């Protein structure tokens, strides 16, 4: 089945909850998985960058993936994040990671290295060849320091077997529209920016991989479904109420912002691994005020 159908709607980039001693809290992770599925998300993304994967070791990543598959129990599809700036290492991970129950792999562009467009093309070509599951590109230039252009995205989509879509997290709407205009029919394109999801779906995107839906799954997934059904008046009414939440969530850091929201709701402890720290007292106060309305 085409991923454009399987992964249409809202995917949630799951946070990783920690105990007071900074160990992964699997009991709470299970509760979060139930919470977002009951809240209406269409699929789950585990081990994305919102899950603080740069601070997780390989054993933890494997354990989190296996636990997520077990807890989800095929209720919704699961996408696994595997990305980095060492192509050889990522190829090895794709060949050895437990991906049997995954629907697809999401791979963030290399960070820091700032490869050329040819370098990005060859990187993703190597990963796609190694991946036992369809590969989703992840363009997030604000984090990686290098934009994956529309031309390179379309070249990968048309020329490289096993590349099935992209999570596009740029605010360059012209770039998004070029991809949407020229993509292959079965190429999935989803937003990577909660605040731009409504206009990007209006331009033709198939949904979003969301941070906000960790904390506000019912409101956010309803907004996305309204968009996908062409009910933009209803979607805008919901989105207007969520704009402040987006601003608060990303004011200082992700996932510090969404974890503060979740902690206020009693879903998790507000604990992050260094170098990320909880939001400031001033921002936390604003988040609490928003959540109390």
Image (cartoon, grey):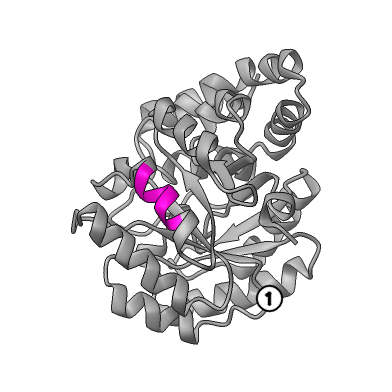
Q: Which secondary structure, mark 1?
A: loop
Instruction: Please name the residue shown 74% across and 36% down the image.
Output: 218
Q: Residue 119 at what x, y percent from top left?
A: 24, 61
- Mark 1, Cα crowd under 10 Å, few <14 / some 14-19 / many 20+, is some
- Position of 179 relative to 38 (above/below): above
In the figure, is residue 111 to the left or right of 33?
left
- Position of 267 relative to 88 (above/below): above
Instruction: Please name the residue shown 69% across and 72% down the image.
Output: 69
Main secondary structure type of the part rendered in magenta:
helix
Residue of label 1: 101
Say which quadrant the N terminus sits in: bottom right
Q: Residue 252 at what x, y percent from top left?
A: 34, 34
Q: Which residues are magenta?
A: 151-156
Residue 110 makes an appearance in the image: no
Quarter-of-image position of residue 39: top right
Q: Residue 83 at what x, y percent from top left?
A: 39, 65
- Foreground pick, 184 / 128: 184
- Foreground pick, 32 / 43: 43
Q: Is residue 210 magenta?
A: no
Say which quadrant the C terminus sits in: top right
Q: Residue 190 at what x, y percent from top left?
A: 57, 43
């Amino acid at each position: 089945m085409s991923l454009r159908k399987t992964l249409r709607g809202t995917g949630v980039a799951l946070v990783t909850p920690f105990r007071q001693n900074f160990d992964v809290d699997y009991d709470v992770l299970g509760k979060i998985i139930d919470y977002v599925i009951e809240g209406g998300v269409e699929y789950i993304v585990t081990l994305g960058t919102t899950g603080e994967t740069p601070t997780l070791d390989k054993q933890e990543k494997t354990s989190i993936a296996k636990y997520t598959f077990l807890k989800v129990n095929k209720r919704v599809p699961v996408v696994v994040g595997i990305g980095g700036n060492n192509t050889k290492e990522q190829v090895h991970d794709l060949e050895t990671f437990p991906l049997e129950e995954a629907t697809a792999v999401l791979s963030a562009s290399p960070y820091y290295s700032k490869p050329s467009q040819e370098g990005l093309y060859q990187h993703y070509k190597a990963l796609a060849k190694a991946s036992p599951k369809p590969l989703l590109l992840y363009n997030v230039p604000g984090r990686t320091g290098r934009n994956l252009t529309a031309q390179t995205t379309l070249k990968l989509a048309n020329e490289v077997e096993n590349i099935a879509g992209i999570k596009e997290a740029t605010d360059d709407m012209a770039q998004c529209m070029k991809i949407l205009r020229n993509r292959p029919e079965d190429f999935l394109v989803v937003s990577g920016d909660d605040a731009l999801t409504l206009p990007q779906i209006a331009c033709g995107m198939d949904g979003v991989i969301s941070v906000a839906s960790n904390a506000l799954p019912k409101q956010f997934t309803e907004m996305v479904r309204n968009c996908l059904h062409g009910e933009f008046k209803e979607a805008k009414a919901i989105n207007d109420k969520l704009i402040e939440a987006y601003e608060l969530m990303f004011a200082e850091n992700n996932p510090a912002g969404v974890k503060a929201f979740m902690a206020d709701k009693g879903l998790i402890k507000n604990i992050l691994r260094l170098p990320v720290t909880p939001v400031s007292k001033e921002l936390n106060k604003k988040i609490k005020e928003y959540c109390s309305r």
